[in-house]
Image: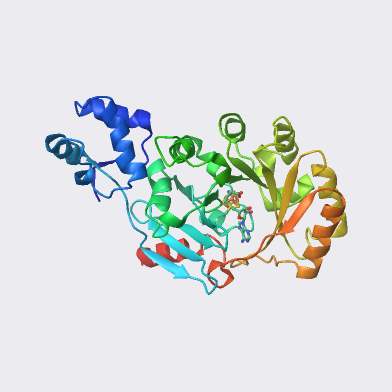
Amino acid sequence: MSEKKRLLGMTLNELKAVAAEAGLPGFAAKQMADWLYKKRVSSIDEMTNISLAKRNWLSDSYEIGKVPPVDFQKSVDGTIKYLYPAGPGNFVESVYIPTSDRATLCVSSQVGCKMNCLFCMTGKQGFTKNLSANEILNQIQALPENDELTNLVFMGMGEPLDNTDELFKVLEILTAPYGYAWSPKRITVSTIGAKGLKRFLDESDCHLAVSLHSPYPAERLSLMSVEKAFPMHGVLDLIRQYDFTHQRRVSFEYIVFKGLNDSVQHAKALAGLLKDIPCRVNLIRFHAIPNVPLQTSDLSKMEAFRDILNDRGVTCTIRASRGEDIFAACGMLSTAKKEKENK
Ligand SMILES: C[S@@+](CC[C@H](N)C(=O)[O-])C[C@H]1O[C@@H](n2cnc3c(N)ncnc32)[C@H](O)[C@@H]1O
Ligand code: SF4
């Protein structure tokens, strides 16, 4: 394992510090950012507008830090799940989802997760570590389909707003003119409502998705222990303080569990809860995980649930399931890989 520091994932300010350390003029930081984020080079040698002597100096202590995926699974529908290394013995998953009009990457933010939601395979892994900005951005930059990407969702492994410092560096690099220069409208951060939510609402223009899964606090608590520390009513009150009537959007994720949260009463309560927030609700099929006795709801129940919300003025859609044959649940591939490595 290399001890060198990684340039990929550094913000312009961090690159300025590297340039100063190397005795390079300030504008060299911008040149490095160009090589990293526009030309997306794989080695410092390719940064040809930096002198050979300085490139050699840089190469002694730094590397680009672009690491290809170590494994992948391809679905019959074109969805590809990639497995990336994330430090010794650790792996994270990214899912590439091409459709007719866009190509979305679902990105991980942590190895494991502290939140331990009952239904989530990543939660079952426990928490190992926050991904660095390098390890988050690497999933995007080392993606074989990097050139095709139109959208990003932080809906892979981990809770992004429990890793806000590294997340924010990545969001800056993706949206800043010196970086990918993407519109924040192409990026959605999904959260269960962790401590970084206020900072995200204040400092970012990216879209927000909130994993709700029940309109009732006690029931939500039985699925998601975060309800204790960050109750959903507090999360919704915070969201109501921000403007989602223009470019920025908020959506709510709702996994529909058979016989648990799929009743008419639940649909009406959810519509009541969200009626004053301009939002969309995405109904998600549950992907079964080992040793959890929950089941996904029937399609007819989900359609009835959706119609109740739409009739009450809350836009609701059933999320198209992609990569069903390989998806199982996010966290499965990395868990299997980790178990294999440990043997
Ligand atoms: C893996 S989480 C990552 C982002 C963030 N931690 C969150 O929970 O919103 C992304 C989405 O996947 C959902 N999810 C987790 N386990 C699932 C499963 N087994 N089946 C379907 N969706 C699942 C979560 O509820 C969440 O809406
Ligand atoms: S659903 Fe999200 S917050 Fe909950 S355990 Fe999984 S990754 Fe963590």
Q: How is the image coloured?
A: rainbow
Of residue 264 and residue 7, the one placed in the foreground of this image is 7
- Viewed as shown, does residue 133 lie left or right of 240? left
- Can you tell which quarter of the image residue 63 is in? top left
Look at the picture and state if 87 lies above or below 50: below
- Can you tell which quarter of the image residue 124 is in? bottom right
Of residue 109 and residue 149, the one placed in the foreground of this image is 149
- How many numbered marks does the figure carry? 0
Look at the picture and state if 306 lies above or below 297: above
Q: Quadrant of the C terminus?
A: bottom left
- Viewed as shown, does residue 285 lie left or right of 13? right
- Viewed as shown, does residue 152 lie left or right of 56? right
- Residue 89 % position (x, y): 36, 56
Q: Residue at x 81, y 38 (%)?
A: 276
User: From where the camera sits, is residue 187 visible?
Assistant: no
User: From where the camera sits, is residue 20 visible?
Assistant: yes
- Can you tell which quarter of the image residue 298 is in? bottom right
Of residue 124 and residue 212, the one placed in the foreground of this image is 212
Look at the picture and state if 311 lies above or below 342: above
- Residue 161 % position (x, y): 55, 40
Q: Residue at x 85, y 49 (%)?
A: 269
- Residue 290 % position (x, y): 58, 68
- Residue 211 % position (x, y): 66, 49
Q: Residue at x 31, y 28 (%)?
A: 16
